Image: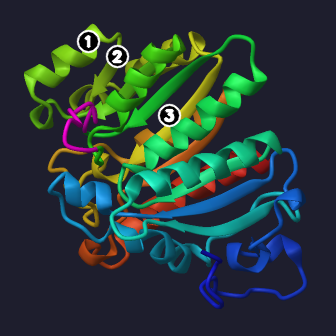
Amino acid sequence: MPVKDGIWSGRIDSATDESQFRLHQVVKCNPELNQLKKDHVAIIGFASDEGVRRNKGRVGASDGPDYFRKAIGSLCYHGEKDSFFDLGNIEVVGQNLEKAQSNLAVTIGQLLAAKAKPFVIGGGHETAFGHLMGILNHLKKTEAEFSLGILNIDAHLDMRAYDSGAHSGSWALQVFDYCNEQNLRLGYHAFGLNEDNNTRFLLDKARSMGADWTTNSHVLTSLDSSLDRVKAFIEKQTHIYCTICLDVFDATIAPGVSAPAWNGIRIQDALSILKVTQESGKLISMDVCELNPIFDQEGKTARVAGSLFNAYLKGSTA
């Protein structure tokens, strides 16, 4: 679905001085894929809450991508000229989530083949499965050996069973199952995990699969040692995919999500992790999920998502 006319707008400090430009003044919408080159950042919206509906969560995240675009247009741009693109939205038709995830995987593969830097804005966290399949398919074609590390900044493990169909809480288990079948190396670290929101069964399952995590309590009391844990995880991988579920943040700053947190982490914690990840040179792609405008308050959650995106943009195009 192409980018809607007029959806990017905002403050204008100068119409000619590029050093004063904001995101809405530099974004190039609906490009041909051959326009995208190395280190260009490309937004793709995944307009879905079908996975959240299946997971019995609060729907509304399907409107998240366009809400995000409207909210961040006035953010200041610090990247290179002609390096920021918007490819529009991938939508779920009816309830066919799996087809939309497949379409997302194809788009991600095309962007990575062009050596661009994808950024996906959801949508429910079912976004992650299509995104990951695009990355894995690309790496299988281009790398003789690799170990993809999932850095999931999230209150939840998202390793719930999917016997009755995939959903927003099953994507990590789905990817583990796929990689086991394909004999692919996969690492997983959940940052900001809230043990109150994950059963002992899920924690034991994740541990048995080699997954690791840093709890929200650890992050809030000892950010430095939390960063060290993530650095150690990154060192073991050849590539890192970063996915951020906005429900990891305290509800006072991110109320517009499917499952708001009552003891969530701070935005600076996530920005510190993102900085470490980008500095490693291993970050291949990123998404931010579960932006739900129905439950947002004064645009707080959209601004959190915008700050995360702008950090990714600055680190990718600098």
**Amino acid type assigned to the residue bearing label 2 in the image:** Ala
- In the image, residue 105 lies at what x, y percent? 58, 46
Is residue 152 covered in magenta?
no
Q: Give the residue at mark 3.
A: 273
**Magenta span main SS:** loop
Q: Give x and y (percent) for residue 39.
A: 81, 46
Magenta residues (range):
156-165
| Residue indicated by mark 2 | 211
Left/right placement of residue 107 relative to residue 38 reads left
Quarter occupied by the N terminus: bottom right
Q: Position of residue 110 (x, y in %)?
A: 74, 47
Residue 64, quarter of the rendered image = bottom left
Residue bearing the label numbered 1: 207
Q: The disc labelled 3 sits on which kind of residue?
A: Ile
At a point 29% along the width and 71% down the height, the residue shown is 60
Q: Secondary structure at mark 1?
A: helix
For label 3, the SS is: helix
Residue 164, magenta (yes or no): yes
How crowded is the residue under tag 2: few (<14 C-alpha within 10 Å), some, or many (20+)?
A: some
